[in-house]
Amino acid sequence: MIEAYNLTKKYNGKVALSQVTMSISRGEFVFIVGPSGAGKSTFLKLVIREIIPTSGMLKVFGRNVGRLKRGQVSVLRRNIGMVFQEYRLLDERTVFENVAFALRVTGASKEEIKKRVPLALEMVGLKHKINSMVSGLSGGEQQRVGLARAIVNKPAMIIADEPTGNLDPDTTMELMHLLKDINGMGITVIVATHDREAVDKLQKRVVYLDNSEVVGDEARGAYLRAL
Ligand SMILES: Nc1ncnc2c1ncn2[C@@H]1O[C@H](COP(=O)(O)OP(=O)(O)O)[C@@H](O)[C@H]1O
Ligand SMILES: [Mg+2]
């Protein structure tokens, strides 16, 4: 699903990701961990083609993302659900509207939207808040709306960049378990995080980045084991 060969990204000559070679298979759950500035977000941004590699190669869904044309970039992104640390929701809209928005941009019909938004909200335990304004929700609830928005298009992959960075420990574990459930439905999940406790508890694959390089990769890892 993702194959990186000597993948390198430099920003104005300064290395942010260096010679990364690894692959992520369909259906995997992978944590990308490491200190601030290690290159976690850079890797995720390369996968969604927000930035392009400086050298090396990155294939996502079998395609070389450095060489995609504009139309192919939209197809790539339609197959990837994104979750962000700061939620990126429309605060003055309802929960329904926020999730529906992700479907509308793909040209989904009204009937489809009416059917799929409640299903996505049910998956994250928020169906009862469907008509609530986002601005009135707690941080954990807002991030669950973010998750519903990410899955409503039935993507092949979910990419979450520090999704629990603004949440307390209990809410963090709830969200991580939801990501695990979503992975159980067959969706590949990649999570960049600082959260040691969550990583240790979930016992999933852990890729460790430090100073732009992959320094460890364990099938059922703990945050610090390989460092
Ligand atoms: N747009 C940018 N321009 C210049 N340098 C950047 C940019 N984005 C990230 N960097 C640098 O690249 C390195 C890796 O950053 P990043 O991938 O954001 O790390 P992480 O997500 O692990 O904290 C850091 O040294 C950071 O300062
Ligand atoms: Mg980051």
Image: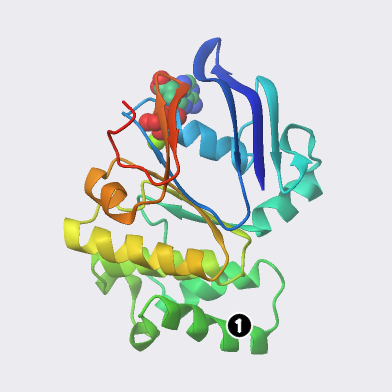
Q: Position of residue 30 (x, y in %)?
A: 47, 47
Residue type at mark 1?
A: Ile
Which residue is painted at 54% across and 71% down in the image?
185
Which residue is painted at 67% across and 48% down in the image?
1
- For ligand 2, the image quadrant comes to top left
Q: Is residue 199 left or right of residue 40?
A: left
Residue 100 to residue 11: above or below: below
Write down the quadrant of residue 138 in the picture.
Answer: bottom left
Q: Is residue 120 visible?
A: yes
Pick the front one: 213 or 136: 213
> Which residue is identified by label 1?
113
**SS of the residue at dot 1?**
helix
Mark 1 surroundings: few (<14), some (14-19) or many (≥20) residues within 10 A: many
Which residue is painted at 66% across and 90% down in the image?
111
Write down the quadrant of residue 147 in the picture.
Answer: bottom left
| Mark 1 lies within 8 Å of ligand 2 (Cβ measured) | no
